[in-house]
Image: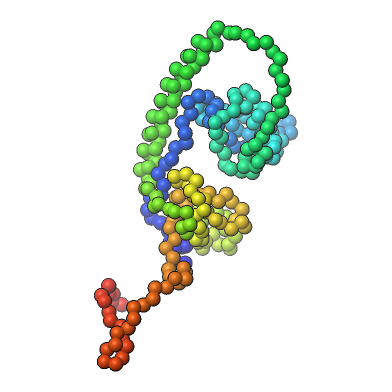
Amino acid sequence: MCAQARTSRQLLEGLLEPLPIPRCPWSHLSVDFLTDLPDSGGFTTVMVVVDRFSKGCKLIPLKGLPTAMQSAEAMFNHVFCNFGLPEDIVSDRGPQFTSRCVLGYQPPLFPWSGEPSEVPEVEEWYRLSQEVWERAHVRLQRVVRRQRIQADRRRRPHPSYQVGQKVWLSTRNLRLKLPCRKLNPNFVGPFEIVRQVNPVAYRLQVPASYRICPTFHVSLLKPAYLSAMETGVCEEPPPPLDIEGSLAYQEQALLNSRQV
């Protein structure tokens, strides 16, 4: 009960782990949705695709929140066909992006019968683009380095967690069905760590009724120190001493005292 209600007064755990820095445009993307917009020609949702290298943005109008297949088709028709396949895509891991039909989407293929043609200016344009991209990559590295230094001033290294270890989960981002939010516990659990996803994220064995992604940042976790009563393992006391025909225990040390 105390572990669930206690509020931490220390810095957040987990140093900043920046995303990989791209080296060329449209190789690393981030995707999200703008929903519940005023109706405009039947469109009420916008899929926002941002290139993390050039900060270019692609806005795709949709008629409501799409399904996984509709999301895959929109990405292919409006992004992949124009800029090629990216190396990675960052999303909020909603059902539109975690479904198998998105991860294994196979677009329709058509034969190409056009004749090849040579454009002399392409080689020079490609060389200049490589130089510009390399300079931009160096600048992005500097920015990320400064951001990391600023963020780590308000953070501290997290303890080392192991698979199978029990941890408490913060309720900061959980919607608990309790009558009074002020009386909600600060932590729930403890839950067992299933695997380490990356240096600052772990997957927990949470109940299916939670209906949330089971991967959490270390800032939302804290070690669970279970008592012998909770673990079911009790240390056996030392055998008593025989003092003048009666059994008695001998004190080893006086650990602390308090006057009440």
Q: Quick one: which residue is furthest to the bottom in this view? A: 245
In the rendered structure, the answer to whether residue 34 lies left or right of residue 202 reads right
Q: Residue at x 40, y 44 (%)?
A: 15
Q: Residue at x 44, y 21 (%)?
A: 134
Q: Residue 97, image x and y in percent?
A: 62, 40
Please say whether residue 170 is visible from this viewpoint.
no
In the rendered structure, the answer to whether residue 65 lies left or right of residue 164 reads right
Q: Camera-side residue: 180 or 122? A: 122
Q: Residue 223, image x and y in percent?
A: 43, 58
Q: Quick one: which residue is furthest to the top in this view? A: 120
| Count of numbered marks | 0
Relative to residue 55, is residue 102 depicted above or below?
below
Q: Quadrant of residue 118?
A: top right
Q: Residue 121, image x and y in percent?
A: 54, 8
Q: Quadrant of residue 105?
A: top right
Q: Quadrant of residue 236?
A: bottom left
Q: Residue 37, image x and y in percent?
A: 66, 37
In the rendered structure, the answer to whether residue 99 lies left or right of residue 237 reads right
Q: Residue at x 46, y 68 (%)?
A: 231
Q: Residue at x 57, y 39 (%)?
A: 91
Colour pattern: rainbow
Please say whether residue 192 is visible from this viewpoint.
yes
